[in-house]
Amino acid sequence: MRPDKRAASSGGLLFGVGAYGAWGLFPGFFPLLKPAGAAEILAHRIVWMALLMVVVVAALRRLGDLRRITGRVWLLLGAASALISANWVIYIYAVNNGHVVDAALGYFINPLVSVALGVLIFRESLNRAQAVALTVAVLACAVLTLELGAPPWISLGLAFSFGFYGLVKKVVPTDPRVSVGIEAALAAPFALAFIVAGAVAGQSAFLSNGPWHAALMVLSGPVTAIPLLLFAVAAQRLPLVSLGLLMYLTPVMQLSWGVFIGQEPMPPARWLGFALIWIALAVFTGDAILRTRRESTRQDLGEPTLDEGKQR
């Protein structure tokens, strides 16, 4: 790997860890927004995030980028906005209704969706260790799914909505900060209309639960925007295979939260799936470390790296 590509990959890894680590802490935040329902919380996330992103994009002097966006990219950003909104409302419902473990299962399945999209659409390849890690992860997801005894609709909804969101973000050429802002802005009119309608009908929890609750609802915007910005950068710098396997960080944190803090049931089959996921992570991480060391050694010796050898 050339130095510039290696630097981009390393930077992408840091951004990815930041995004998935932040998402892993979300089960501790959204219950604080009760008694607001999932739809109202989603609407406020979108509106406050949109306002924040307008300030960010303006401060970075990137408003001019809007004029250079083609019709195709606007359609892609519209699709991304719809997909991430669907993902958010499913996740908020799960966390605020005692289904954190189900949400974690969704994000265990999500990397499989991303890896499959990377292989099928972008023709990304798997080396032997990555294939082993993915096989173990498939087995873990099968064990966890069978344990539920019913189709895991929450899990599948989260996995596929975010998997396709990552696919769209991979092909959007717009600056990540601008694209995230546009996604929020496209959904903001619908979210604002929902908030106004709820207030008129007397069903809004925003201003009826004290200033602390209102402040938390406003804070949901920045809490939403920051990991999305980190993810947008990581999606452009990392292959979908690496990005997909890195996603395991979030469900590991969420599952730990659901079990040890939320006291959700954890029968032996779920513990088995949890152990298999860690095995998959260990194989993937070990392979990544070994490959990095081998490529560094080749560069030190003046030999072509694996990527350069393939190009010759």
Image (cartoon, grey):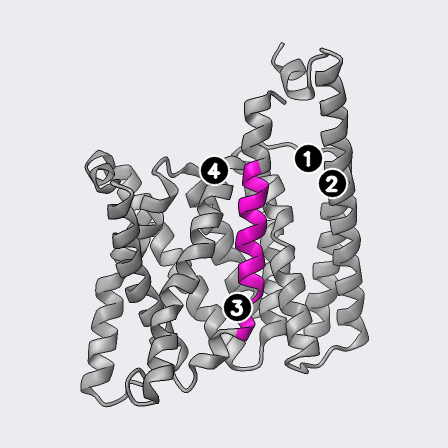
Instruction: Please give left or right for residue 132 compared with residue 36 in the image.
Output: right
Position of residue 63 relative to residue 93, above or below, is above
Tell me whether the residue at label 1 lies in contact with that at label 3, contact meaning CB atoms closer than 8 angstroms.
no
Badge 4: few (under 14), some or many (20 or more) residues near its Cα, within 10 Å?
many
Which of these two is toward me, 107 or 29?
A: 29
User: Which picture quadrant has residue 81?
Assistant: bottom left
Residue designated by label 4? 236
Residue designated by label 3? 26
Sequence-wise, the earlier of marks 3 and 4 is 3
Badge 3: few (under 14), some or many (20 or more) residues near its Cα, within 10 Å?
some
User: Does the magenta run of residues contain 14?
Assistant: yes
Which of these two is toward me, 214 or 86?
A: 214
User: Does the magenta run of residues contain 199?
Assistant: no
Q: What element carries label 1?
A: loop
- Provide the residue span drawn in magenta: 11-28
Tell me whether the residue at label 3 lies in contact with that at label 4, contact meaning CB atoms closer than 8 angstroms.
no
Instruction: Please give left or right for residue 129 compared with residue 159 in the image.
Output: right
Residue designated by label 2? 131
Residue at (78% x, 69% y) in the render: 271
Give the label, 2 or 4, closer to the camera. Answer: 4
User: What residue type is disc 3 on?
Assistant: Phe
Which of these two is toward me, 2 or 306?
A: 2
How far is disc 2 from disc 3 in space, using C-alphas? Answer: 30 Å
Residue at (72% x, 31% y) in the render: 292
Q: What element carries label 3?
A: helix
Tell me whether the residue at label 2 lies in contact with that at label 3, contact meaning CB atoms closer than 8 angstroms.
no
Tag of residue 126: 1
How far is disc 2 from disc 4 in space, using C-alphas? Answer: 23 Å
Tell me whether the residue at label 2 lies in contact with that at label 1, contact meaning CB atoms closer than 8 angstroms.
yes
Sequence-wise, the earlier of marks 2 and 3 is 3
Position of residue 208 relative to residue 240, above or below, is below
Sequence-wise, the earlier of marks 2 and 1 is 1
